[in-house]
Image: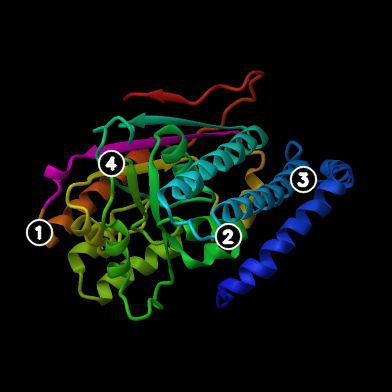
Amino acid sequence: MPMPPAWVRRCVFAPLVVVLAGVLVSTLPLWLIAALAASPLVPGHLRVPRLVWLAIVYVVWDAAALVALAALWVVSGFGARIRSPRFQRAHYVLTGRFLAALFWIARWSLHLTVDVVGTDPDTAVPGRPEIVVSRHAGPGDSFILIHALVNWFAREPRIVLKAALQWDPAVDVLLNRLPNRFISPGRTGTDTLEQQIGELATGLDDNDAFVIFPEGGNFTPRRRTRAIAFLRDRGLHDMAVRAQALRHVLPPKPGGLLAALDAAPDAGVIFVAHTGLDRMLTVGDVWRELPMDKQLLMKFWSVPPEEVPRGEKERVAWLYDWWARIDEWIEQHQPQPRPLPTVWPQRRRTRP
């Protein structure tokens, strides 16, 4: 389905979300009573109430973010200074607070913990921009990564995202005000995808983090098979053989990362792997997993700019080497269910 124009998304979809949130809040007891009544009919511990609660919370969260963004727009002189450094910083602060609230509610509702091992993006080399290269698997993994970068590591991310995410009004308004890039693969207009990524990665400062997902989408067995077949059809037999050995990740598409490295030669590179949401590939999977009762484990590896290869072929081989390393790490850290505790644990940073 084609993306509606911006004026429709801002003038129609956004107000509808605010109205819907008001209706849901005013009728919240009725929704919860109905969900509790249906709960015994569905296997799983309070599965229906959890799902109803999270759905309502997300709509209210979206509406609250839209109201805050509207206030910032007015204070900025009805948008006249919205791109100024002061208001850009205000938007990053707003992003951090809303993501922190969403993460806390999700962790409490779904019984999740997130443990971080390896290099922290805020302590690898203070004052150095970073290119963050992450795997893509499971619902909400990009939310968790951006939450970590903003709230745990005090970074200001620039993100390459799919254009379809603009269907969410709060995501649409907020991320279009910040230096991010929504892309539609196959429909990039006069600029190539690599050109767009290179422009976004230009001019990173000391607390920026350029975020890219080289797989281009969440891992599924079908996408893995198609990606390997695509490499073979293009005559890239060596890459297809290497991709065939990857069990938990899709073969990375190097073009975007190469463009980012060229545009930000002084930036370090941080590779990110995570486990915990891998098996939730469909809406049915998410439904069956509620409550999740899981530990999400995130691993960061830091590569200084002087260790990044210079040639294109060397960089492609280097990226595939790292993807094989990430794949092996995922194999060794498959998610484990956790018993329900009486006290919520705090986020822990451990070292291997």
* Count of marks placed on residues: 4
Q: CA distance from mark 4 to mark 2?
A: 30 Å
* Tag nearer the camera, 3 or 1: 1
Quarter of the view holding residue 18: bottom right
| Residue at the limit of the structure toward the bottom, as seen here | 190
- Left or right: residue 229 compared with residue 177: left
Mark nearer the N terminus (1 vs 4): 4
Residue at horizontal 38 percent and vertical 65 percent from the top: 225
Q: Is residue 3 above or below residue 332?
A: below
Q: Amino acid at mark 1?
A: Gly
Q: Residues within 10 Å of mark 4 (few under 14, many from 20)?
A: some
User: Which mark, by number, is residue 5?
Assistant: none
The magenta stretch spans which residues? 293-309
Q: Is residue 134 left or right of residue 322?
A: right
Percent x, y of residue 10: 62, 66
Residue beneath label 4, please? 206
**Disc 3 secondary structure class:** helix
Residue behind mark 2: 78
- Residue found farthest to the left: 311
- The residue at which mark 1 appears reads as 311
Tell me which numbered mark, 1 or 2, is placed earlier along the sequence. Answer: 2
Residue for point 73% across, 40% down: 44
Whichever of callouts 3 and 1 sits on the residue coming sooner in the sequence is 3
- Res 48 label: 3
- Please state which of residues 19 and 220 is positioned toward the viewer in this rendering: 19
